[in-house]
């Protein structure tokens, strides 16, 4: 058995963990079934919004999100300094909006939930919200501002992490689908891709929605993840004066990038690996974004796409060692893959090399699914 770590999956999670391992002198080989970073990571809108995107009864996800956003500034500064690439890390914050009395009541309930958890949110009148973003609808009934929530260009993040991984000495095999994870009598022995065999001391499975489909995984290792489809589109804006904060409205978010691109998404669909861009999905996004920001109506559409978020059984990440010694999992990030990237990279690399589970990822052990 050779030394080093073998990673299956070349999205932000696999690349991020691999980069951190390489920084500590570990030999790392990464296998990616297609082109690195071209699935969920590439499709994501890049929101870093633990407060704005908080969901009831998901306090452990909130805690990890807050820890990850705490790490983000240093993580990005290091990544950009190492690669010379920019990833468009923006800190203008978020504005959540309501467009009816019922939506305002729902937003008020969420605002109180956020305040109970100590999140730095501020209730805005419609007038105050339009002072910050003049393009918001005249039908606005209420809004909540959160300066701590940020955003990033996920495609630039993928490109930078890929370069960082290779530049740091990682071995990247793209278009290399796994045909067998070799586990014999509860012992991990290697991975096969066609006629090629890869040996390593330990294995990390970070294959997103495909993590549970790898051939050869025994049932007590196979993570309970599924694809959760999200459709998105982008428009071209005249400049940052059109929109500077990212906007969260019922059924849609609107994320402006520094290059004038505005990403609008995303549907949440249990449709398996169906890649169809549907009229119904786009209609929902178009109408919802237009209702919140009427000027969208005049902007040219640039692109339409979809991605598959890896959703676990309880919609929380799966981070830790499996029932087979030396086989680790980092998947199930659902809608927070980009947000959780620094925390996942930092703490999973520590676990892999030091053998101790860092406190921030202890609630996400794969063992919680054991019958």
Image (cartoon, rainbow, N blue to C red):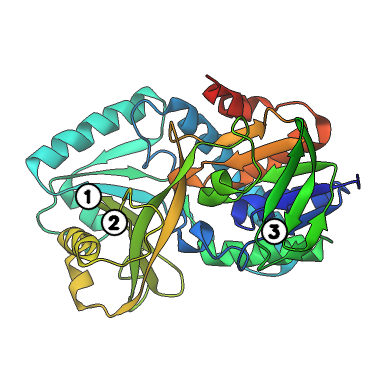
User: In screen coordinates, is 75 left or right of 118?
Assistant: right
Q: Which residue is drawn at 55% across and 47% down?
A: 213
Vertical placement of 130 versus 50: above or below?
A: below
In this rendering, the answer to whether 133 lies above or below 322 is below
Q: Do labels 1 and 3 touch, CB within 8 Å?
A: no
* Secondary structure under the numbered disc 3 in the rendered image: helix
Q: Crowding near pointer 1: few (<14 within 10 Å), some, many (20+)?
A: some
Asked if marks 2 and 3 touch (Cβ < 8 Å), the reply is no
**Front residue of this view, candidates 188 and 50:** 188
Which quadrant holds residue 170?
bottom right
Labels 1 and 2 touching (C-beta < 8 A) = yes
Q: Mark 2 points at which residue?
A: 132
Asked where in the image residue 278 lies, by quadrant, the reply is bottom left
Mark 2 lies on a secondary structure that is: helix
- The quadrant of the image that shows the N terminus is top right
**Which residue bears the numbered disc 3?**
79
Q: Name the residue under label 1.
A: 128
Q: Which residue lies furthest to the right in this view?
A: 2
Q: Is residue 276 visible?
A: yes
Mark 1: which secondary structure?
Answer: helix
Residue 135 place in picture, x, y as percent: 22, 64
Instruction: Classify mark 3: residues with Cα within 10 Å, few (<14), some (14-19) or many (20+).
Output: many
Residue depicted at 43% across the width and 46% down the height: 335
Q: In this view, does 105 lie above or below 195?
A: above
Between discs 2 and 3, the one toward the N terminus: 3
Q: Distance between the residues labelled 1 and 3?
A: 36 Å
- Which comes before the other along the chain, label 1 or label 3? 3
Question: Where residue 218 appears, x then y in whole percent?
Answer: 64, 35
Between circles 1 and 3, the one closer to the viewer is 3
Q: Is residue 91 left or right of residue 157?
A: left
């Amino acid at each position: 058995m050779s030394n080093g770590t073998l990673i299956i999956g070349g999205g932000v999670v696999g690349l991020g963990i691999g980069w951190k391992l390489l920084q500590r002198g570990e030999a790392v080989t990464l296998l990616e079934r297609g082109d690195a970073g071209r699935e969920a990571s590439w499709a994501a809108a890049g929101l870093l919004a633990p407060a704005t995107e908080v969901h009831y009864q998901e306090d452990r996800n909130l805690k990890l999100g807050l820890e990850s956003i705490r790490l983000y500034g240093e993580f990005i500064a290091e990544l950009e300094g190492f690669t010379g690439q920019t990833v468009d890390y923006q800190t203008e914050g978020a504005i959540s909006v309501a467009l009816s009395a019922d939506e305002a009541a729902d937003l008020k309930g969420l605002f109180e939930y956020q305040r109970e958890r100590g999140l730095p949110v501020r209730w805005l009148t419609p007038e105050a919200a339009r002072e910050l973003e003049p393009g918001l609808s005249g039908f606005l009934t209420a809004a909540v501002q959160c300066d701590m929530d940020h955003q990033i260009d996920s495609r630039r993040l993928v490109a930078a992490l890929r370069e960082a991984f290779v530049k740091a000495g990682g071995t990247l095999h793209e278009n290399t689908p796994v045909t067998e994870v070799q586990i014999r009598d509860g012992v991990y022995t290697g991975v096969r891709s066609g006629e090629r065999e890869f040996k390593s001391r330990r294995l990390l499975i970070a294959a997103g929605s495909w993590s549970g489909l790898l051939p050869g995984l025994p049932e007590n290792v196979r993570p309970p993840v599924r694809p959760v489809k999200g459709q998105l589109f982008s428009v071209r804006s005249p400049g940052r004066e059109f929109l500077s904060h990212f906007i969260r409205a019922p059924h849609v978010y609107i994320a402006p990038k520094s290059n004038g691109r505005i990403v609008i998404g995303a549907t949440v669909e249990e449709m398996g690996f169906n890649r169809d861009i549907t009229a119904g999905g786009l209609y929902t996004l178009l109408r919802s974004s237009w209702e919140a920001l009427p000027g969208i109506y005049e902007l040219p559409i640039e692109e339409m796409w979809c991605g598959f978020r890896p959703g676990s059984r309880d919609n929380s990440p799966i981070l830790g060692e499996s029932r087979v010694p030396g086989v680790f999992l980092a998947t199930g990030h659902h809608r927070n893959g980009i947000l959780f990237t620094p925390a996942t990279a930092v703490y999973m690399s520590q676990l892999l090399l030091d053998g101790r589970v860092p406190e921030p990822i202890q609630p996400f052990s794969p063992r919680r699914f054991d019958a």
